[in-house]
Amino acid sequence: MQTTPVGPTAATPPDPFALVRTRGYAVLLVITALLGVPISAAAFGFLALVSELQSLTYTDLPKGLGFHGTPSWWPIPLLAVTGLLVALTIRHLPGSGGHKPAEGLVTNKAPSGAELPGVALAAVASLAGGVVLGPEAPLIALGGGLAVFAVRAAKRDIRPNASAVLGAAGSFAAVSTLLGSPLLGAFLLMEAAGLGGATMGIVLVPGLLAAGVGALIFTGLGSWTGLGTYSLVLHQVPHADRPDLAGFGWALAIGVASALLGTGIHRSALFLQPRIERRRVVATVLAGVLVGVAALVYAEGTGKAASDVLYSGQSALGPLLAGQSGYTAATLAVLVSCKALAYSLSLSAFRGGPVFPSMFVGAAGGLALAHLPGLDVTSGFAMGVGAMCVAMLKLPMTAVLLATLLLGLEGLTVMPLVIVAVAVSYVLTLRLTPAPAAVEAPTPASP
């Protein structure tokens, strides 16, 4: 008869918070706070450079060439040159230009020091040229890579677990105010990384500390330079009606529609990606031209600016909501179609992040449906943002927070509808996504 050992010989479960009680963890917190200063400053400079280049290439250059305003066909040659620059960067510089956006957000692999220039150049060329991607994925990669590179340059024998924590803290600092609040960036990174339990707490505290320092740096530099903080902000939010039965019906419909559209965008991007990689230069230039054609079709068909289709949509979300009365349902439907096509092409060929374009496509779709009875503007906007965001990212908590916290008090009113729309879109998207191929376990060797 076997007995269970008791007393001092009994196995004691490991303390998950033992690391937090060590002197090394306190040192780690100090290092992450110090790293937050230069990394957030570098991230601010990255966003400022992209913004200036966007204005230069889309507005100032055609004006300097003698055009009165920007011609609607201008995005086609602009994006062809962009495709050439990005393709050459991906082909010839280490790191292949960073993570592939069609494969989702990658938060657990920081680029090496040798790969950082290629990641930065591919992202700047893509975003400045007008492709439909956001800056969040490159900033996550650059922030994590810079943090690890700086610490390893000072101390080569850094442990892998400490390196992972520092990389995460660098990413927190880089996107500290990009989504409107350090907390939104923290939720995005933690949910994308899939951390939970004690591990989440150990990584979250240094990350939040770096994000807080980064937010202060962003605010200070924005005030000092007069450029702002490049943060997602909605200044004019219409009043939202209290949820009713019709609103919950619309939540179901928007969840289903977003899952179908998001799955179509994602699958087409994954279908095109390997074909573009086989003929990188020619295919990337062609993808850029097609993005420009989508912008041209929208501009000529609706009389609106081609820039509605171009870029991530981060800075256009506020004006879209504030000026929604100037868009007919047909115009918004064309905008959703052209933006979704350009989004899919951009995901397959260029480098950037998938968050902001998904929010813009969902917002435009929600506003289009708000022209129908039973759905107010703010509810349609919020549900569209949340449902499309979760369809593309598969991060339900982040999607709900992005769709509601940005709307202020009105966001609290529509939160129940957003939760329903996000839940429906999330479940249906997972049902429509093919299950990963099963990997056979290796046959054990004979003794």
Image (cartoon, rainbow, N blue to C red):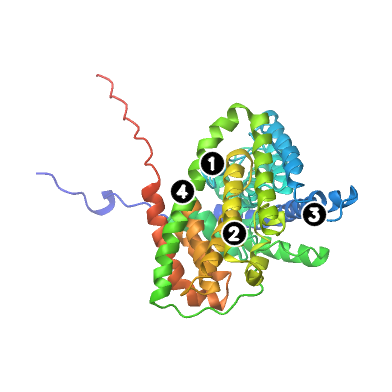
Identify which residue, 35 or 123, lies in the foreground.
Answer: 123
Q: Which residue is painted at 44% across and 54% down in the image?
A: 259
Q: Secondary structure at mark 2?
A: helix
**Sequence-first tag of 2 and 1:** 1
Q: CA distance from mark 1 to mark 4?
A: 10 Å
Where residue 216 sits in the image (x, y, percent)?
Answer: 70, 65
Could one spot residue 375 in this view of the protein? yes
Q: Circle 4 is placed at which residue position?
A: 263
Percent position of residue 206, x then y: 57, 57
- Under circle 1, the secondary element is helix
What kind of residue is marked 2?
A: Phe
Q: Residues within 10 Å of mark 4 (few under 14, many from 20)?
A: many
User: In which quarter of the view is residue 29 placed?
Assistant: bottom right
Residue at 61% in and 47% down: 342
Residue at mark 2 to residue at mark 4: CA–CA distance: 16 Å
Residue 152 position by quadrant: top right
